[in-house]
Amino acid sequence: MIPHLTTALSGPLLELEKRILESSTSIEHWFRGKWQEHTPPFYASVDLRNSGFKLAPVDTNLYPGGFNNLNPAFVPLAVQAVMSAIEKICPDAKNLLLIPENHTRNTFYLQNVARLATILRQAGLNVRIGSLNPAITEPTTVDVPDNPSMLVEPLVRKAGRLGLADFDPCTILLNNDLSSGLPDILKNLHEQYLLPPLHAGWAVRRKSNHFAAYDDVAKEFAGLLSIDPWLVNPYFAVCGEVNFQERAGEECLASNVEALLSQIRTKYLEYGIKDDPYVVVKADAGTYGMGVMTARSPDDVRGLNRKQRNKMAVGKEGLEVSEVIMQEGVHTQEVVGEGSAEPVVYMVDRFVIGGFYRVHSAKGSDGVLNAPGMHFVPLAFEEGCNTPDHNATPEAQPNRFYAYGVVARLALLAASLELERTAPAEE
């Protein structure tokens, strides 16, 4: 299934794609230099929005949970990328412990774990699955639709090492985003590699730190291509000490929404854009599309009703939302079937390994698509998104997807800077 844009293929987006295509040699050389200076996260996924005039990341996940939604044809790319990552981290690695989220009844998530474990095994690793779930007190067989059953085992901590009762891994890979806190069992490990590092978990990570790093990356990239950084970068602002239930911080939210809308209107005027600007308000920590709302006026964040406050006050694992990021809303002009769509690009190490479209038939171009009712189209990246075709037009499928891969890797580079800047002193 091939996605299409609801806008004409002209204007800033086409010019941006043309510039990216023409500069692909310089871009790849630039990336190679950056990866010599910075270490990419082990893996990541990036949500992109293509407005027809702008292509920008709106979220970067360091614990991607949708490997089951990728085109199976791209598994060999993922296997090669895992091999590259492991060789840099632990060249002699043989045993890898995979720690997933605690929920064992979400069949879609379990399919993700199964696909991820398969990729790791095909990369030459002996993979076992250990759980942080206190309810897992003995080896437990879990049924996974369309896959062999999965054995999930309780973690065992012995002195400074973490493993299973009869399994001592070199590397520990988290597919658990640690929203509920940093477990003591994962701390102070001796001569074991924990991927991603603990400070990548949502218990301490903040989206605002990521997009502050992305600001720096986008400016340098824009300088390389001689383009306006705004074409690949959403404006954002932050409010701390917010309490939705007690209506604390409302004026901070309102004033920042007003300032962002003013900035966006100025850019829309500059580029002759007729769309209505909007701002997405979301928890500064967390995922799963929880604690998210849109605002088209400062009044939209003042005097929220009880239902709105309840929605915004709590994130994943029932944690209270006290810090909020406000981000420029980027319209999506991509459509798959009858639904609004946004590309999600997956990377392992520094390599793009594929992606899919998140699609929601009940949402418009300014809707938050990561919401109940969404579905995924895994075949969208049927020609890959890491090799441009210089003989084709900029909007041709491999070139559009190449542009997606470039912008996703900008977010990946920002994540590496973010983790460097926020690393605890002892690391």
Image (cartoon, rainbow, N blue to C red):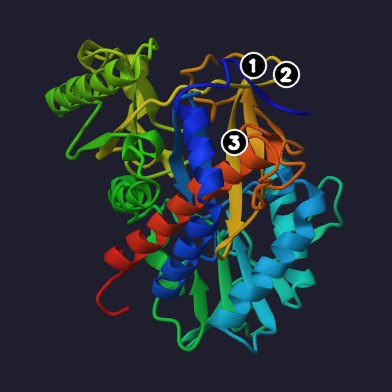
* Label 1 CA crowd tier, 10 Å (few <14, some 14–19, many 20+): some
Asked if 318 appears above or below 117 in the picture, the reply is above
* Label 3 CA crowd tier, 10 Å (few <14, some 14–19, many 20+): many
Q: Identify the residue position indicated by label 1 in the image.
A: 361
Q: Position of residue 362 (x, y in %)?
A: 60, 13
- Label 1 or label 2, whichever comes before in sequence order: 2
- Label 2 or label 3, whichever comes before in sequence order: 2
What whole-number distance in Å separates the C-alpha atoms at marks 3 and 1?
15 Å
Amino acid at dot 3: Pro
Q: Residue at x 40, y 12 (%)?
A: 275
Amino acid at dot 1: Ser
User: Quarter-wise, where is residue 131 in the image?
Assistant: bottom right
Front position among marks 1 and 2:
2
- Label 3 or label 1, whichever comes before in sequence order: 3
Q: Is residue 379 left or right of residue 9?
A: right
Q: Identify the residue position indicated by label 2 in the image.
A: 337
Q: Nearer the viewer, residue 161 or 263?
A: 263
Q: Is residue 25 visible?
A: yes
What whole-number distance in Å separates the C-alpha atoms at marks 2 and 3?
14 Å
Q: Identify the residue position indicated by label 3 in the image.
A: 343
